């Protein structure tokens, strides 16, 4: 089993790619190399392959990376399934994980993050949770987004260490994480991971 994330930048025309493209490439690079593990195509669309238990955290990290820039956001669809054909380019590989990701992406209407897997009951539950989470994540300010991104990228750092990295006070970090709903998102990531580990 693998997971394929299909994404695109919302309102990409409202922000010069030189603002966000480097940051997007950098975060995708942390999961592997292009074009085998990830690829950007049509200027503002991309695909990324990660382990199923990593998929949601990867999406939250990508979301935080993009939300640090004004006026833009990101749509993300997670597809879980098999990979039956491996090409040099991820966008030419195939299997049910790719099909699920594509179908899920096509069905993103009012929501900006959803999942489609072989496990219907799991999908129903997690998609409701993701819709609720988006009430917070879709409204992150660039300050909140940078804070969430830094926290996810430094999982072993405490608030004092994060304060040093971001040149803020520990109080700023504590308040900022509260505003960003980080504790709740962290619980969601933990729930997702434990469920996926029992299913896959």
Image: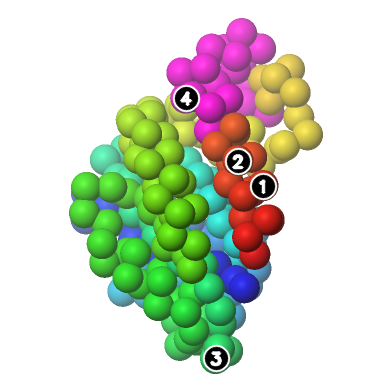
Does the CB distance between marks 1 and 2 fall below 8 Å? yes
In what element is the residue under mark 3? Answer: loop
| Residue that carries the numbered disc 4 in the rendered image | 180
Left or right, 29 with reference to 45: right
- Report the magenta stretch's main SS: helix
| Residue that carries the numbered disc 1 in the rendered image | 194
Magenta includes 184? Answer: yes
In what element is the residue under mark 4? Answer: loop
Segment tinted magenta in the rendering = 164-185
Q: Nearer the viewer, residue 149 or 131?
A: 131
Q: Upstream in the sequence, badge 2 or badge 4?
A: 4
| Residue that carries the numbered disc 3 in the rendered image | 85
Q: Is residue 39 visible?
A: no
Q: Position of residue 145 (x, y in %)?
A: 47, 34
Name the residue: 58% across, 46% down: 192
Q: Position of residue 180 (x, y in %)?
A: 47, 25
What separation in Å lies between label 4 and label 1 (alpha carbons)? 23 Å
| Residue that carries the numbered disc 2 in the rendered image | 191
Name the residue: 44% across, 45% down: 125
Report the mark closest to the observer, 2 or 4: 2
Q: Nearer the viewer, residue 79 or 125?
A: 125
């Amino acid at each position: 089993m693998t997971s394929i994330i299909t994404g695109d930048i919302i309102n990409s025309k409202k922000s010069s790619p030189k603002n966000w493209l480097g940051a997007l490439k950098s975060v995708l690079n942390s999961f592997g190399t292009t074009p085998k593990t990830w690829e950007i195509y049509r200027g503002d669309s991309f695909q990324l392959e990660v382990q199923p238990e990593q998929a949601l955290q990867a999406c939250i990290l990508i979301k935080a990376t993009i939300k640090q820039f004004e006026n833009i956001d990101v749509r993300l669809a997670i597809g879980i399934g098999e990979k039956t054909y491996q090409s040099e380019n991820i966008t030419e590989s195939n299997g049910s994980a790719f099909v699920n990701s594509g179908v899920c992406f096509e069905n993103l209407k009012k929501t900006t993050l959803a999942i489609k897997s072989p496990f219907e009951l799991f999908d129903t539950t997690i998609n409701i949770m993701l819709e609720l989470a988006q009430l917070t994540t879709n409204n992150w300010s660039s300050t909140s987004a940078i804070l969430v991104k830094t926290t996810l990228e430094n999982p072993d750092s405490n608030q004092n260490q994060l304060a040093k990295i971001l040149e803020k006070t520990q109080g700023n970090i504590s308040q900022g994480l509260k505003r960003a709903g980080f504790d709740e998102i962290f619980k969601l990531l933990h729930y997702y991971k434990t469920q996926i580990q029992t299913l896959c």
